[in-house]
């Protein structure tokens, strides 16, 4: 059998093919399809998918595909996707990484959208600025957050010691914790977690003394003796038996499941306020949250920070649509209600008022804490220089050296300062 | 259709075409997933690539830093060398011991072989590392046993820098299955008449082992030693899981590959990490070459 095609038929066929493919192309262009990437728990995924679904119902020409990972694999995934020129349109961003990504040109500058499709003026300057890098908006605050001291109220009452409260000094908290350990009501139980390797905690201590982790021009904002004093303070707590021993603290793997309070090793631990609900979920006993201790006359150490941000990729083909979705999440009553306070307390007062009446008791504790803390906080610290991410791990390592008795607090102070400075010089 | 009445001799390529066709997946895999990325990584090792911006050539900067001023390179190398030097001989000795026991022709041998081989299959998996973490935890199985049997309150093995590396070495030894199977095959190759002659001469068991079994087994020992050494240098998963990717406490489990991973994906220094990877290639090559050179003095091939 032969198939003969004359020229006219061939041309007609080609035209038809072109026409059909043209329709196909046009359709693909008209429908906006975007990708959204975030890290977090199942609770967060359920809420995020629900918000996406509600948004798509209202905007039938938009489709958003969502993907979620754990914290660790999230950053590997995002870095490789971005490096491979395949970044998601919408990126859940962390305050620790926004500077790295923004300064390396991976994120969209959203400043031109402000007051137009990005109507977040009611956030107030501090909460808008928390998404800025070098004066431009690269991320939108998804929830206000601060550090907190978590207290297992039941364990304190059982030990017959009055639970800690806002406004204690560091020394008072330490002594109270030593009493909990001494009460020996539970096996292998101590007053507090050893937080000497915790960067937010060290930063708070520095700020209370008028210092900082980093200056605005990207240098270290403290000296060796500040770090040495911090390490000696924790050495002192170890001596009086207030905090967990080094090999117990080393079991903490930066996850809520291994938190010293959750694993029932300590009556006090330290975390961020948006994690309070999740910690209460992991602990059967009643817990409370209080502000960090501070000495009389000290400066404000804590500050409000975004628990996480939403950014748009600089290479997104649908920048306008992506920004509109970001706005939906934080300023549209429907979107914000679906997300709730799972990513922190909403920055918009309008949305916060809208949500508060329906919250459960634990979430209300968090909203109340942020309200109580707000008048006492200091300014958001200047953006950390490149390479600062490594210093968080360095602090943990050197704090462990002190805790295991391999280095003195004095030497550790000098060592940390020197190596931290070298890390940021390297970038 | 016309029927061919004679057959032209097919060209060599045509004759081998099915072979090449079946090899195609391997070729694609080798060039696309092994050789290609290797060449790219060699190029990246001379750049400051940070994943987000285009790489810039920086010459030998990365290698110069490795050679002169990187404490973590030195400490991670020390941890890895210690791990290699401890785990490989112990693992081989253990594997040989079990292989000798199994070689006695006991009943149900295939079952034992399978059971002993199982840890090797599972050993480098995340699940086993998680299990290991729980066994050596402060309230883990090991400490519970120590408490009930000896009345000792054991430390938390994995979170104490004095012990954490040893738990990983024990984990490596426990995965003795694959060298054990190879030893078993090697033992079967030794001619039985040698043993018969030796026992007729009244040689002791120890003497038979050191004069017959061990010398004739040296090619297999050599093979196992080289393979296991390379594997040990590349160890990653157990340390990653047990220390949650930190290499802690106090860098006591900071394996070389873990440090490389941290530089690449933790701190976005892809170029530096690529250089670290190539230094590891060179180190493994040197070790392997050294093994081959030394082999002529202690490996006996039966001829």
Image (tube, grey):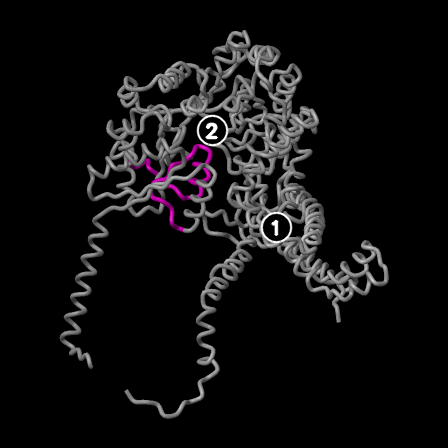
Say above or below: B26 vs A224.
Answer: below
Q: Is residue B87 left or right of residue A18?
A: right
Instruction: Give the percent coordinates (x, y) of residue A258.
Output: 52, 28
Q: Residue B257 or B20: which is nearer the viewer?
A: B20
Protein chain holding label 2: A
Instruction: Give the percent coordinates (x, y) of residue B157.
Output: 64, 32
Q: Quadrant of the C terminus of chain A?
A: top right
Q: Is residue B183 left or right of residue A322?
A: right
Query: Would you say residue A244 is visible in this rendering?
Result: yes
**Number of other residues with Cα within 10 Å of mark 1, as a class: few under 14, some 14 to 19, many 20 or more:** few
Instruction: Give the percent coordinates (x, y) of residue B4.
Output: 35, 90
Query: Would you say residue B279 is visible in this rendering?
Result: no
Q: CA distance from mark 1 to mark 2?
A: 63 Å
* Residue at x 58%, y 36% (from the top left corner): B133
Q: Which quarter of the picture shows residue A119?
A: top left
A87 falls in the magenta region: yes
Say above or below: B219 vs A73.
Answer: below
- Dot 1: element: helix
Residue, disc 1:
B112
Q: Quadrant of the N terminus of chain A?
A: bottom left
- The residues colored magenta run A85-113
Say above or below: A258 vs A373.
Answer: below
- Dot 2: element: loop
**Number of other residues with Cα within 10 Å of mark 2, as a class: few under 14, some 14 to 19, many 20 or more:** some
A289 falls in the magenta region: no
Instruction: Give the percent coordinates (x, y) of residue A245.
Output: 63, 23
Residue, disc 2:
A382
């Amino acid at each position: 059998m032969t198939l003969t095609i004359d020229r006219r038929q061939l041309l007609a066929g080609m035209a038809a093919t072109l026409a059909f493919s043209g329709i196909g192309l046009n359709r693909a262009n008209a429908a906006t399809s975007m990708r959204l990437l975030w890290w977090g728990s199942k609770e967060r995924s359920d809420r995020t998918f629900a918000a996406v679904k509600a948004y798509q119902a209202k905007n039938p020409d938009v489709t958003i595909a969502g993907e979620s990972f754990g914290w660790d694999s999230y950053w590997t995934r995002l870095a490789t996707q971005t490096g491979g020129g395949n970044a998601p349109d919408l990126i859940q961003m962390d305050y620790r990484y926004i500077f790295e990504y923004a300064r390396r040109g991976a994120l969209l500058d959203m400043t031109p959208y402000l007051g137009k499709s990005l109507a977040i003026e009611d956030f107030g300057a501090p909460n808008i600025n928390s998404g800025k890098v070098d004066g431009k908006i690269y991320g939108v605050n998804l929830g206000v957050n601060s550090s907190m001291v978590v207290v297992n109220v039941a364990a304190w009452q059982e030990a017959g010691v009055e639970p800690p409260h806002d406004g204690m000094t560091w020394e008072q908290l330490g002594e109270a914790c030593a009493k909990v350990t001494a009460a020996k009501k539970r096996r292998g139980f101590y007053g507090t977690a050893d937080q000497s390797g915790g960067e937010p905690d060290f930063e708070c201590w520095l700020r209370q003394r008028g210092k900082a982790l980093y200056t605005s021009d990207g240098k270290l904002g403290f000296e060796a003796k500040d770090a040495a004093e911090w390490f000696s303070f924790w050495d002192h707590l170890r001596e009086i038996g207030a905090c967990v021993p080094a090999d117990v603290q080393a079991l903490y793997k930066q996850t809520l499941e291994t938190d010293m309070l959750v694993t029932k090793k300590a009556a006090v631990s330290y975390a961020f306020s948006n994690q309070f609900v999740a910690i209460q979920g992991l602990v059967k006993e009643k817990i409370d949250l209080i502000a960090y201790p501070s000495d009389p006359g000290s400066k404000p150490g804590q500050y409000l920070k975004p628990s996480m941000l939403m950014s748009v990729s600089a290479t997104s083909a649908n920048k306008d649509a992506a920004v509109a979705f970001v706005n939906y999440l934080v300023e549209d009553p429907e979107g914000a209600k679906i997300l709730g306070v799972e990513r922190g307390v909403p920055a918009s007062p309008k949305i916060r008022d809208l949500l508060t009446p329906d919250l459960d008791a634990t979430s209300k504790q968090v909203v109340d804490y942020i309200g109580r803390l707000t008048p006492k906080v200091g300014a958001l610290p200047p953006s950390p220089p490149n390479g600062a991410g490594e210093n968080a791990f360095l602090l943990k390592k050197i704090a462990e050296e002190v805790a295991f008795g391999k280095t003195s607090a004095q030497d550790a102070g000098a060592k940390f300062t020197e190596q931290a400075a070298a890390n940021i010089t390297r970038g | 259709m016309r029927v061919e009445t004679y057959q032209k001799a097919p060209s060599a390529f045509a004759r081998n075409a099915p072979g090449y066709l079946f090899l195609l997946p391997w070729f694609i895999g080798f060039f696309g997933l092994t050789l290609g990325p290797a060449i790219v990584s060699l190029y990246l090792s001379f750049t400051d690539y940070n994943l987000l911006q285009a790489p810039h050539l920086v010459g030998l900067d990365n290698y110069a830093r490795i050679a002169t001023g990187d404490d973590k390179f030195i400490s991670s190398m020390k941890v890895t060398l210690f791990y290699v030097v401890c785990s490989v001989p112990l693992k081989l000795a253990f594997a040989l011991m079990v292989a000798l026991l199994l070689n006695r022709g006991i009943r149900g041998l295939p079952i034992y072989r399978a059971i002993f081989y199982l840890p090797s299959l599972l050993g480098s998996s995340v699940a086993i590392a998680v299990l290991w973490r729980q066994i050596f935890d402060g309230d883990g199985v090991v400490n519970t046993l120590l408490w009930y049997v000896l009345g000792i309150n054991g430390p938390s093995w994995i979170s104490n820098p004095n012990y954490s590396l040893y738990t990983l070495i024990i984990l490596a030894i426990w995965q003795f299955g694959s060298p054990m199977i190879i030893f078993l095959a090697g033992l079967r190759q030794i001619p039985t008449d040698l043993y018969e002659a030796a026992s007729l001469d009244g040689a002791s068991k120890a003497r038979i082992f050191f004069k017959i079994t061990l010398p004739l087994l040296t090619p297999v020992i050599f093979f196992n030693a080289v393979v296991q050494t390379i594997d040990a240098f590349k160890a990653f998963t157990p340390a990653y899981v047990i220390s949650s990717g930190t290499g802690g406490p106090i860098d006591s489990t900071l394996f070389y590959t873990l440090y490389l991973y941290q530089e690449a994906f933790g701190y976005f220094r892809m170029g530096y990490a690529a250089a670290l990877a190539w230094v590891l290639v060179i180190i493994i090559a040197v070790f392997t070459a050294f093994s081959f050179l030394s082999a002529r003095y202690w490996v006996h091939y039966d001829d």
